[in-house]
Image (cartoon, coloured by chain):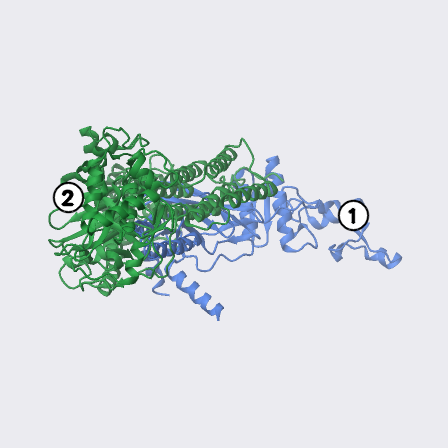
């Protein structure tokens, strides 16, 4: 029962606060309720009114009415504080899984000042900020990421309790643009690339290198091709040969290099390797199933690789109808959606 | 692992939730100090000192110079202070002690004020403390002080909610002032129309200490103490002409039982005459013979009335002995209305019943032999009226003095006064006269009240002060009923004709203890004038604000057209609240719409998007202005430069440091957009039909 109600409420809220990278707040989407202190204040006013009635004290009446009227005035003030404010996602952040990912917003006040605005998303929040009328400022909200891929906060809450903290007016922005979360780097075991430079025949190289094979006991995850089956037949010991030829080209970071590791772990290894290469500023390429990034170096390249690792195999969030910069959601999105 | 700097974004400093901003705390402490001021005379000194220390401690802790006490020390302090409190209170439970406990609780709370939550708790307590203050002090200056303290609290709350507000934004005072101005009409309407109900349940506001004023016992020295106070007792407004000074005898209560040296009220069952309550309940303009009294709180039930009055308003009840009583103790200023009868007091000349006669002849079994001897002598020589005349004649002719500094008369005070000392105050003479009359077989009683009163500023009303307190005698004369006899008038006619100041002028004892009283310097015109003007303001304040209770509300309503009763008032109140909310809502909605219309930047941007779409370049979701410009340029090379410049401007609006989108910037954008549109028109697609238009998907 409660669940049904909650879903219904969520749908209703979602209609009022559609997914959009830019949200301006007005009567349609601002909610306002007394805070806990506001409720106690109401009780206090009631007690004062009763005191005034019982002691027939006009001045207590007067104080009660004054405070009551101020409470109503504060309601408008609190509402106005938020209304007219516009929040625009400037840059959905990037970061490693498990880190707090910065979401940058441009907050611009409308006609009046917006004072003591708090942004929060789940348990992360931004210190209250103030914007004078007609001004704008940039705010960064850190959103905690759990795993790699696209991170799109369901709802980012924007709230104000100014002036008295007796009332809270709040609304949400539901950004469209997702943040990209890179895999959490995990120190990779020494391994090479399976990508060949192409000037040598790999098969030939492998056979040649047979002599230099490094023999070691079998570990879980080793490919069966590499097991020395003859030796196994003879001695019953599983021994694996690591051929020199398999060290591969250190320029390439290869998805397939980590035999036996599962995909996520591979991506984490690769992320570590990317950072490792970035530190040495050595050129490297990235070989992912379905995506190959040619060797290069520099921060942009590093970023591109990390992004590729982050979103590998992930589907972008479905209802990503990002409004173009500066457009209101209604004008553009409805037109787009109409034919569908 | 070290992350590249681009990803290691610094978290904005988030203050711990529980740290209170210093300036907010300062406002709160300031407000507390101000709220203590109106109670200065009823709070014990140790409590004020303790509160000061506790608040100071909290402040020093805020400054980081000391630490707030831990739980044990805190409990210790609490226990000690409560023990001191219990010791000083000694089990008396009065409003005073309750109020000091309240103050003590606030004081102790300072040590526990750590979080915003505690701040709110203190805020609520202090607001209620302001309300409690109003129970004790209603005069305009203290009321302003109280309101100031509440305003301080509200500013403090704003500071708490935005401690780092830049100074170029409106300050808390300005915001509060604006809010007050906007809400003031509703407050005034509510105050006027909110129905003043009768108390829901009766909680007598009995103060522990007696207020200054007359009491229901009279010892010879009592009233001369009162004579040293210039506090106001009540103010009276007359519908017709004010009675002459010598007729301003305000009867309060009758003392008919002499207990040794002390006159008391007899314990007999009081006769209660159902008050002649007019249906109008004392509403409307004062009639010709009516008068209206605004009495300061006395915590007592007796009302003061001129001789021969009857009750008009329904908050006073007429009792036996031509006295008036309130329905409940006057713990706040009381306003009541009476009318003067045409016939003089006691004119009906009824017989005095046997029980009554015995009651008014009561005397102690022994004592004052010489006075009794004198009475016996008079009784043998004169009729009842003759006795009275000769006694007054004795006061007039012999060397009796009216003084505020009578010598002590320990034993047989009446004898001492009449035969040896011959110096006394009104209470002495009234007691002695009653004694002699009773001893002579004439039923007599002491009446206590006020005599006199001077006109306030503009002569609109009379101010009666404590030093006008007076005691006189009423004697029952067959055929005439109760007759007022004032021995003081015989000894010191000035007292009755023009007041105490003149009566004791030679002695210099008028208000000797009150250095600051304006009445003391009554002969200095400026001081007198200023004091009277202040009193006038206070009078209007009391009449229309403090005293605006059921009676005055009905009074005001009766002057408005249409019969407005309690129910109508209820509707009116609801209407006022509803209309207030509605007007405020409409107002804010209008303001909001105006705000939206002014969102010019969005309009320009939207117009650009429409232009793009009209030439077949659809705006894609999540596209940056420069890519849109690029695609537009691809489709229409003629506008390449314009479109790129425009996109740069949009970009700079978004991505440069946040700055105001000033009018100049907007104007340039509009101009540029106009140019772009013109260029697009000039290079119409018909001329370039061979070129592929529209974006590549």
Are dots 1 and 2 in contact, CB under 8 Å? Answer: no
Tell me which residue sits at (54%, 40%) in the image.
B8
**Residue identified by numbered label 1:** A210
A214 and B586: which is toward the camera: B586
B416 and A308: which is toward the camera: B416
Residue B468 visible somewhere in the drawing: yes
A100 and B257: which is toward the camera: B257
Indicate the position of residue B148 as horizontal and vertical percent values.
33, 40
Q: Residues within 10 Å of mark 1 (few under 14, many from 20)?
A: some
Indicate the position of residue B137 as horizontal and vertical percent values.
33, 44
B314 and B304: which is toward the camera: B304
Colour blue, chain: A
Tell me which residue sits at (31%, 46%) in the image.
B372
**Host chain of mark 1:** A
Label 1: which secondary element: helix
**Host chain of mark 2:** B
Q: Is residue A205 left or right of residue A340?
A: right
Most distant residue in the bottom direction: A1
Residue B638 visible somewhere in the drawing: no
Relative height, residue A111 to residue A231 (above, below):
above
Q: Is residue B32 left or right of residue B194?
A: right
Q: Quadrant of residue B669?
A: top left
Tell me which residue sits at (75%, 57%) in the image.
A224
Colour green, chain: B
**Residue identified by numbered label 2:** B460
């Amino acid at each position: 029962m409660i669940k049904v109600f909650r879903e219904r409420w969520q749908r209703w809220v979602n209609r009022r606060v559609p997914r959009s990278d830019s949200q301006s707040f007005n009567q349609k989407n601002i909610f306002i309720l007394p805070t806990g202190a506001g409720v106690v204040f109401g009780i206090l006013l009631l007690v004062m009114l009763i005191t005034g009635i019982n002691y027939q004290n006009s001045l207590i009446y007067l104080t009660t009415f004054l405070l009551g009227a101020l409470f109503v005035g504060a309601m408008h003030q609190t509402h106005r504080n938020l209304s007219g404010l516009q929040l625009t996602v400037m840059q959905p952040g990037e970061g490693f899984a498990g880190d707090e990912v910065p979401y940058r917003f441009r907050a611009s006040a409308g006609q009046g000042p917006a004072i003591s605005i708090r942004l929060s998303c789940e348990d992360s929040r931004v210190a209250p900020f103030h914007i004078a009328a007609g001004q704008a400022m940039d705010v960064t909200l850190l959103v905690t990421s759990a795993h790699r891929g696209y991170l799109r906060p369901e709802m980012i809450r924007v709230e104000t309790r100014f002036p008295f903290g007796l009332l809270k007016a709040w609304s949400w922005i539901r950004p469209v643009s997702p943040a990209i979360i890179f895999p959490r780097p995990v120190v990779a075991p020494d391994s090479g690339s399976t990508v060949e430079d192409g000037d040598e025949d790999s098969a030939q190289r492998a056979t040649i290198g047979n002599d230099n094979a490094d023999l070691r006991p079998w570990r879980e995850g080793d490919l069966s091709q590499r097991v020395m089956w003859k030796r196994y037949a003879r001695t019953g010991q599983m021994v694996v040969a690591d051929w020199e030829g398999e060290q591969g080209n250190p320029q390439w970071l290869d998805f397939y290099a980590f035999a036996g590791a599962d995909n996520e772990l591979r991506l984490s290894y690769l992320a570590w390797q990317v950072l490792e290469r970035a530190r040495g500023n050595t050129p490297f390429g990235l070989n992912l199933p379905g995506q190959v990034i040619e060797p290069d170096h520099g921060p942009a390249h590093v970023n591109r690789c990390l992004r590729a690792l982050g979103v590998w195999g992930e589907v972008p969030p479905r209802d990503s109808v990002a409004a173009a910069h500066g457009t209101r959601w209604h004008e553009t999105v409805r037109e787009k959606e109409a034919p569908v | 692992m070290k992350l590249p700097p681009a990803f290691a974004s610094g978290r904005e400093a988030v203050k711990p939730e529980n740290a209170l901003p210093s300036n907010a705390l300062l406002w709160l402490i300031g407000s507390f100090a101000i709220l203590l001021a109106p109670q200065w005379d009823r709070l014990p000194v140790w409590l004020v000192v303790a509160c000061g220390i506790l608040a100071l401690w909290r402040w020093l802790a805020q400054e980081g110079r000391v630490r707030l006490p831990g739980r044990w020390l805190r409990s210790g302090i609490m226990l000690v202070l409560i023990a001191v409190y219990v010791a000083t209170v000694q089990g008396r439970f009065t409003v005073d002690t309750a109020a000091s406990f309240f103050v003590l609780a606030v004081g102790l709370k300072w040590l526990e004020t750590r979080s915003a939550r505690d701040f709110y708790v203190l805020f609520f307590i202090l607001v209620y403390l302001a309300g409690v203050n109003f129970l004790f002090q209603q005069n305009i200056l203290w009321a302003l002080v109280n309101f100031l303290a509440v305003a301080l609290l509200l500013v403090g709350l704003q500071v708490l909610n935005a401690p780092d507000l830049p100074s170029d934004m409106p300050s808390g005072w300005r915001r509060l002032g604006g809010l007050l101005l906007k809400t003031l009409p509703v407050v005034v309407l509510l105050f006027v129309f909110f129905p003043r109900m009768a108390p829901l349940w009766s909680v007598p506001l009995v103060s522990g200490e007696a207020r200054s004023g007359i009491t229901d016992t009279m010892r010879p020295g009592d009233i001369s103490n009162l004579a040293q106070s210039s506090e106001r007792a009540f103010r009276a407004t007359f519908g017709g002409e004010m009675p002459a000074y010598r007729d301003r005898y305000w009867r309060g209560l009758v003392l008919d039982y002499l207990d040794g040296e002390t006159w008391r009220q007899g314990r007999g069952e009081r006769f209660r005459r159902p008050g002649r309550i007019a249906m109008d309940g004392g509403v409307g303009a004062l009639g010709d013979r009516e008068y209206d009294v605004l009495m300061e709180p006395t915590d007592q039930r007796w009302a003061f009335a001129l001789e021969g009055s009857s009750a008009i308003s329904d908050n006073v009840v007429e009792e036996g002995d031509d006295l008036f009583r309130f329905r409940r103790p006057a713990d706040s200023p009381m306003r009541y209305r009476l009318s003067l009868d045409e016939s003089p007091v006691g004119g009906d000349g009824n017989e005095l019943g046997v029980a009554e006669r015995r009651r008014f002849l009561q005397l102690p079994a022994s004592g004052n032999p010489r006075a009794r001897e004198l009475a016996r002598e008079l009784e043998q020589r004169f009729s009842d009226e003759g006795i009275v005349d000769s006694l007054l004649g004795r006061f007039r002719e012999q060397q009796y003095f009216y003084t505020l500094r009578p010598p002590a008369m320990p034993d047989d005070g009446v004898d001492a006064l009449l035969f040896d000392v011959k110096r006394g105050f009104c209470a002495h003479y009234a007691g002695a006269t009653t004694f002699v009359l009773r001893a002579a077989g004439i039923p007599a009683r002491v009446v206590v009240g006020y005599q006199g009163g001077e006109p306030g500023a503009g002569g609109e009303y009379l101010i009666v002060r404590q030093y006008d307190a007076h005691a006189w005698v009423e004697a029952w004369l067959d055929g005439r009923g109760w007759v007022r006899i004032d021995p003081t008038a015989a000894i010191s006619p000035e007292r009755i004709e023009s007041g105490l100041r003149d009566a004791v002028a030679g002695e210099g004892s008028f208000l000797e203890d009150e250095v600051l009283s304006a009445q003391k310097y009554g002969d200095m015109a400026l001081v007198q004038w200023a004091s009277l003007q202040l009193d006038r303001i206070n009078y209007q304040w009391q009449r229309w604000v403090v005293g605006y209770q059921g009676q005055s509300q009905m009074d005001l309503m009766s002057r408005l057209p249409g019969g407005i009763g309690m129910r109508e008032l209820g509707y009116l109140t609801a209407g006022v609240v509803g209309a207030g909310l509605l007007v405020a809502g409409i107002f804010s909605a209008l303001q909001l719409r105006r705000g939206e219309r002014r969102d010019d930047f969005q309009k320009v941007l939207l117009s650009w998007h429409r232009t793009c779409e009209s030439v077949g370049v659809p705006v894609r979701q999540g596209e940056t202005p420069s890519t849109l410009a690029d695609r537009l340029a691809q489709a229409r090379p003629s506008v390449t430069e314009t479109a790129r410049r425009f996109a740069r401007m949009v970009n700079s609006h978004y991505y440069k440091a946040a700055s105001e989108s000033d009018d100049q910037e907007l104007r340039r954008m509009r101009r540029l957009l106009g140019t772009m549109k013109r260029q697009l028109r000039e290079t119409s697609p018909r001329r370039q039909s061979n070129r592929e238009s529209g974006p590549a998907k």
